[in-house]
Amino acid sequence: MTEPILEARDLHYSYPDGTEALRGVSFSVASGEALAVVGANGAGKSTLLLHLNGYLQPSRGELRLKGQPVTPATVGQARRAVGMVFEDPDDQLFMPTVHEDVAFGPLNFGVPYEEIDQRTSQALAQAGAAHLKDRPPYMLSAGEKRAVTIATALALQPEILVLDEPSSHLDPRGRRRLIELLKALPQTRIVATHDLELVVEVCSRVIVIDSGVIAAVGETVELLNDEELMLAHGLERPHILRHLHPH
Amino acid sequence: MRLAEWIDVGRIDELGRLDTPVHRLDARAKAVTVLAYIACVMSYHRYEVVALAPLALFPIVMSSLGRIPWGFLWRRMLVAAPFVLAVAVFNPLLDRAQVTALGPIGISGGWLSFSSIMLRFVLTVSAALALIACTGIYDLCSGMERLGLPGIFASQILFLHRYLFVLGDEAQRLARGLAVRGFRPRVLRLRVYGSLLGHMLLRSVARAERIYCAMVARGFDGTIRTQRPGMLRLSDAAFVFGWAGYFAAARAWNLSALLGDWLVRVAR
Amino acid sequence: MHMADALVSPAVGGTMWGVSAAAIAYSARKVKLQRKDSLVPLMGVLGAFVFAAQMINFTIPGTGSSGHIAGGLLLAILLGPEAAFLVIASVLVVQAFFFADGGLLALGCNMFNMGFFPAFIAYPFVYRVLVRKQYAAPRGWVAAVAAAVVALLLGAFSVVVETKASGISALPFGTFVMLMLPIHFAIGIVEGLATAAVVLFVARARPEVLAGGEPAAGRRRSLRPVLIGLLIAAGLVGGALSWFASTHPDGLEWSIAGLTGHTELAQQADTAHQKLAQVQGGSAIMPDYGFKRPGAAGQHGAARAAPAWPAVSPETSLSGLLGGLLTLVLAVLVGLALRTRRAPGAHTTVGR
């Protein structure tokens, strides 16, 4: 059995004001798989995601990336290996042009100037946003912004791509493009989302989080089809499954 | 600051992204030339009016080659004019001694200096606008950083510029939200004002935290790194020295008077 | 309070540029030393916040009019003096370029007038001292209004000094001061009220946000930069006052002579001065206009005969005017020609 690329062991985390966000979360992710993290608002999804690149450190428990624990000392490697795509693109596109935003990561990690253009072109092409290279971010549509944020993460050539609510604010076409992109990307993908239809299309496995603990783990269709389970954790069975797998 | 002004900010950005010979010049060359120009314009004696006329060539050429609409420049100038007018208008009131004459009409020093101030206003403001509209804020900041501007200050300007629209949109949405519920923004009471701005402030702070998180996720360690801007070229040097020469000539000799004298002589 | 280039001489503008540049360099270093990377996005966003906040007005209690916040003091409360100064300076840069609010030569003056006083004087020496971490009413209101008034009065006074030192406006020092100070006193009250309103809200909702401005426990604030700043301010004030009290020659002439050494210009100035001096003796409306008094020894050395009329023939000034107009027309024609050179539709945005 190959080693999981990412492994969370009993993660606990409390915010400075005392709120317990994670109360013992453990799971593992295999290399190349697409894993969904679903749960009601406030369940702890975003907090969990912020642990995956070392931005937050658990108060108890450990996160292992490629077998090595993620600590304040090794956080740099975690950031290079785990690309994050956040919910609000405006939070993530803070440079004057798309090109600068995509180059931001590589420049920070010391990629030589001569290689920067190549890296950014590659990342933008992968994300389907090559034509946006010189645009300022405020001139982009929601779908374009989303594609560019993915490119900014891809520019560091990460092994894992983590996305927080990637399909929010997208129109149907933008959403369709996103789904196709996510399906095509070779990296390990971890997607936290309310968009259960997207989960069915993109992800093979699902983690259900409720109140800071993992309520269920399993194959996508099997889990999401379980109406009782869904309702118990503030979710519902996605419509697409009602048609594909009528009960 | 109303909607019209916000739109103009976007317009200036758009203009900054055009591709013209002026745009392609190095930002440092343009910035230095414009600053020299402004210093030159302001170095004239307070009563000089016609001697300033040849200097109008610079902003005119810059804006023409840079494809900045003159109507746009004019509009921006009008907006900024009132305060200068308010101060300048005292000159003709206070300085009424006749200093020169135009045919039979006597002209007081006050009117000369008033005209001079307003002319200088037009020249300096149009030069500044031409600079930003032909260069773009990013190239300008990068260029100034090469000239010694502290990096953290250059980044500050760029970040501010970036989030200007984002926060402006949010503020307008908030204001509209209030309007829909019956509050007209003009009659906000202080307590409601404090609450509204307080909310806006906290949302801004929260956004800043999220941006920081995104920056750190891509390896941010305190320094904003940018790709090296290009090297200075011959055209940049030609631009700077050419215009500097023209400014010096205009300053040293009253070109208007020379031209006028020659005309009068020819007409005879 | 934004000064335009048209009223600032290169000497004054250059000097204040130097002062502000030093302040920026100092503040940038101080902020870097704090090692709070999260300040970078925070400062940027708060700068944008200032613009957004200026779009919203509130009614000033007791009057019918409305006002809005300028934000300098609030920034100091949120970020501390050095970071706040950088943000204010960046706001002024954007205002100068994108809103033509304030000139480029005058940028140094504006940064000093509107940034230095709230951040380095009013905040640490008035606001902090009065508030002592208790932001609630009534202390919060008093502290904010007092600090804002101090900042604005000092700023307004600087504007007057800088304008007079530039020698372009004819407003006499006394009149200018009497116009500026009361107005800016009122503006200061408005600013203080607006600032306090926001601070009180934030203090109740998320007080830790305000801790950004507080000096960390045990961190000794170096007084040296503040003292230097105070010395500069004192120098400006003292110098201005003594200058106008003395009978020294007008600073403008010194700067003209120094800059150009052009005798023709000096002659023009001379005859103008002569005429004016003659007139001034008679009409003592505004005695301290600052021009050279008749009989005072001067660098120009022109004959001190008192002509009834300056030695300018109508023909000469007419041809000068003609030449000036023609120059303008030529310039505009050149400009138009350069515009229509390009084919229509060649309006492309090419990437770098």
Image (cartoon, coloured by chain):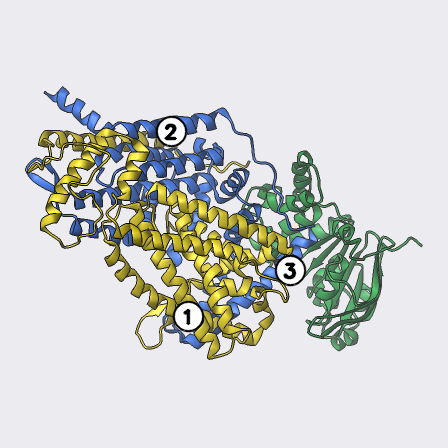
Q: Chain of mark 2?
A: B
**Left or right position of B134 against C333:** right
Residue A67, picture quadrant:
bottom right
Q: Are marks 2 and 3 on the same chain?
A: no
Res. A87 mark:
3
Chain A hue?
green
Residue A200 drawn at (x, y percent): 75, 61
Q: Chain of mark 3?
A: A
Residue A90 drawn at (x, y percent): 58, 56
Label 2: element kind: helix
Q: Chain of mark 1?
A: C
Chain C hue?
yellow
- Whether C246 is drawn above or below C133: the answer is above
Q: Which chain is blue?
A: B
Res. B243 mark:
2
Tell me the quarter of the image containing the C terminus of chain C: top right
Label 1: element kind: helix
**What amino acid is labelled 1 in the image?**
Ala
**Left or right position of A184 against B63:** right
**What amino acid is labelled 3 in the image?**
Glu
- Badges 2 and 3: C-beta atoms under 8 Å apart? no
Residue C252 drawn at (x, y percent): 27, 42
The residue carrying pointer 2 sits among few (fewer than 14), some (14 to 19) or many (20 or more) residues within 10 Å by Cα, namely: some
Residue C4 versus residue B6: which sits nearer the camera?
C4
Which mark is in front, 1 or 2? 1
